[in-house]
């Protein structure tokens, strides 16, 4: 994918938590890392960034862990891109070329142009709650406890 690993993990974490709503208790990051099959320490770092930016909330202690903030489902997915410094990812060449344009296209410029418009609309126009309601999260259905 064109997203950084941190952004990818953040999106996966948010969808994982969103799919489990409403939670009766906080979820431990270690359990989420195991379910998503991602490195614990990298996921913990991503979770801390999302907590700092008020997308996630946390609780310490034996029943502690993480959960989505109450307002998270009303946010567009682009918020995650902004937090991890990738807000302009859909305005760049997918191959990373600086000179890619309609006049000087890369080999997949035309294909990326069409796909980019659809992806950008998904990230900027749809909220996390709408994406959840659109049933775009089937991969997480089998991870529920």
Image (tube, grey):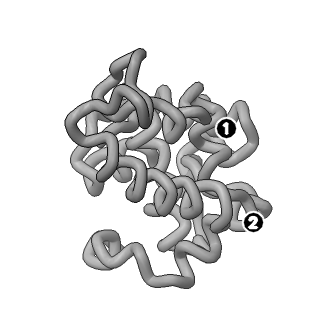
Q: Which disc, if any, is residue 51?
A: 1
Taking the spot 50% from the left edge, 41% from the top edge, the residue there is 90
Q: Is residue 40 left or right of residue 91?
A: left
Q: Which disc, if any, is residue 111?
A: none
Given residues 136 and 23, the one toward you in this image is: 136
Taking the spot 64% from the left edge, 32% from the top edge, the residue there is 83
Q: Tell me if residue 30 comes above or below residue 5 in the rendering.
A: below
Residue 23: image location, x then y, percent: 59, 71
Q: Is residue 48 left or right of residue 74?
A: left
Residue 143: image location, x then y, percent: 30, 70
Q: Is residue 122 left or right of residue 124?
A: left
Residue 20: image location, x then y, percent: 50, 72
Which residue bears the numbered disc 2?
74
Please give the count of numbered marks on the rendered protein. 2
Taking the spot 71% from the left edge, 31% from the top edge, the residue there is 52
Q: Residue 107, located in which quarter of the rendered image?
A: top left
Q: Which of the two labelled residues, at mark 1 and mark 2, occupies the earlier sequence position? A: 1
Is residue 145 among the parts visible in the rendering? no
Whole-angstrom CA distance, mark 1 to mark 2, is 16 Å
């Amino acid at each position: 994918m064109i997203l950084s690993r941190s952004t990818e993990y953040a999106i996966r974490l948010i969808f994982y938590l969103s799919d489990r709503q409403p939670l009766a208790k906080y979820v431990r990051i270690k359990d989420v890392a195991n379910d998503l099959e991602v490195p614990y320490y990298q996921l913990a770092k991503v979770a801390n960034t999302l907590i700092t930016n008020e997308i996630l909330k946390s609780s310490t202690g034996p029943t502690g862990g993480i959960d989505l903030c109450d307002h998270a489902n009303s946010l567009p997915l682009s918020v995650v891109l902004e937090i991890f410094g990738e807000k302009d990812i859909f305005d760049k060449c997918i191959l990373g070329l600086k000179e890619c344009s309609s006049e000087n296209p890369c080999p997949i410029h035309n294909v990326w142009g069409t796909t980019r418009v659809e992806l950008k609309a998904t990230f900027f126009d749809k909220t996390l709650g709408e994406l959840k309601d659109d049933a775009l999260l089937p991969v997480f259905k089998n991870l529920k406890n």
